[in-house]
Amino acid sequence: MEPPDRGCPVYPSLRMHAIEVSGLRKAYGNLEAVRGVDFAIEEGEVFGLLGPNGAGKTTTVEILEGYRKRDGGEVRVLGHDPERPGQDFRERIGVVLQQSEMWPNLTVRETHATFAGYYRAPRDVDEVIALVGLSEKASARVKTLSGGQKRRLDLGIALIGDPDLVFLDEPTTGFDPQARRAAWEMIRSLRSLGKTVLLTTHYLDEAEQLSDRVAVMREGRIVRVGTPAELTTTGLQTEIRYRQNGEDILVRTDEPTRVLAELTSAAVARGEELEGLQVRRPSLEEVYLALTADEEVEA
Amino acid sequence: MSAEAIRVSTRRPPRALFLHQLRSEQLVFWRSREAAFFIFLFPLLLFLLLGSVYSGKYQGVPIVWAVLAGLVGYGCANTAFAGLAIQLVIRRESGILKRLRSTPLPPATYVTALLASTLIVFALQTLALFLLGRALYGTPFPSDLGSFVATIVIGAAVFAALGTATASVIRSAEGSSAVVNFILLPMAFLSGAFGPTKGYPAVLRAIGDVLPLTYFVKLVNAVYLHGHAVWSQPEALAVLAAWGVAGLIFTIFRFRWEPRER
């Protein structure tokens, strides 16, 4: 049976779906956190779930991780229903929670070794510590680590069981720019390891930089899915700016090629130069702000 | 191929998981200087203090024997009740419990290993109390060792059940130590763990008469001071069992693995 694929581009690929979600709903009391979400993630894909706080990202991810029961809809994660996960499911997933701390008095190596002991075929402890860039801190106690280093520890123990699927819930929230770049490098290295990654973030540049595809969530629904490039080529018009007779002119168009050709050929015919000519595609940020604008106004 | 077949073939054996987790619990416990001091050493320090100030006879034996028995009781409540409750709240609120739930470690294995680790700490503490008493105050070892070991295990089980129940109602890690000590210290005084309650006002003694530690201290007294078998104290055993079952039921219905929503 084909998974429902509403809104998802179809890829000419034989790869399996690591995650399939259709019609997912979840309410907390009167608050409908997730109101009918559909998406599918291929094996080996880095999928970004993007949206403002309260859009339902964490609720969605925690249902997929097996922490919460859904109210409705179908969910398959690595072929399992996460409400009845079983040991095989837990062997194959790695989780970085939005907020969690580890035992403060164990060392980085001891913490990794503790988690490694839970898995049937864990990765080498020192290898994983090196992968997340904590080799120099391997013998340091967790309480002496900086915020960014603790987050890398979280990532290390998420990878220690050699999972096929990694959930990263806002992995860089609260990082300084340098630490974010370092974290991005690590997440890119996950892709090169062939892991499937589900990433939530409210940072646009993060989703754009890391994801093969991005789903924009708003008020419990997915309002747009596509590659970062697809998201920026649909929805908003291209802007053409130039200066004529000392006046700034702004043209918004769905047909930039034709409009630009007309503008420039007319100018060439007049023997003029179009001063300050610029052609801009909307950034993902502008698309995102447009998609989530109503909510900002309500809030 | 059934899911069951996959599961059986891809899982670490339960015994290996249990031993791994027990080792890790011991490492976590002894690494924390605060826990090692307040949970393990504090009853020993109290014994040094109280053992040197009391003199005379109690229930026909040197009073320092009774001080030792009382502090075994206090140690039990301190380790299995207070220590366990505080550790569980901190782990829950910091997200460790939630994080562990996404690993293949079964919750039952986790809980069993944590309880076994707590029992080990309490047993070592009791041994240390007896060695200290022997060296400083000439207190004897228990004459009926089997009954004494059974007493220790029963006490640890009852207070661990009350510890997990208490952890279920404490809301924040910051307040956990205060709340637990607010229960523990008055209970220790009212139950006679720090000395006989004969001179206390009737109302305080009435409160003491329903506390589980009162009956655990009675049980330790009977077994250690008078050499009775543990089964000769049906009243104390019944009250302890009632508290233990109540704590267990409360835990089953109210225990949470996840931190409070922030």
Image (spheres, rainbow, N blue to C red):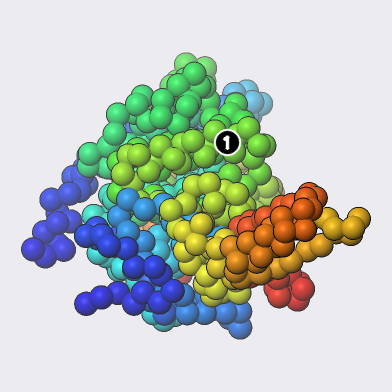
Q: Is residue A88 visible?
A: yes
Q: Residue at x 79, y 53 (%)?
A: A272
Mark 1 residue type: Arg
Q: In x, y percent, where is residue A20?
A: 34, 68
Q: Residue at x 60, y 66 (%)?
A: A258
Of residues A57 and A39, the one nearer the viewer is A39
Q: Nearer the viewer, residue B84 or A112?
A: A112
Which residue bears the numbered disc 1? Answer: A181
Q: Is residue B138 visible?
A: no
Which percent across, then down, holds residue A281? 63, 58
Q: Chain of mark 1?
A: A
Residue B49 is left or right of residue B228, and the answer is right
The image quadrant that residue A54 belongs to is bottom right
Q: Quarter of the image containing the N terminus of chain B?
A: bottom left
Q: Residue furthest top?
A: B135
Quadrant in which the C terminus of chain B is drawn: bottom right
Could you say where residue A269 lies in the image, as x and y percent from the top left? 72, 59
Q: Give the residue displayed 32% in from the left and 63% down from the top.
A: A11
Q: Nearer the viewer, residue A244 or B187?
A: A244
| SS for callout 1 | helix
Q: Is residue B226 above or below residue B104?
A: above
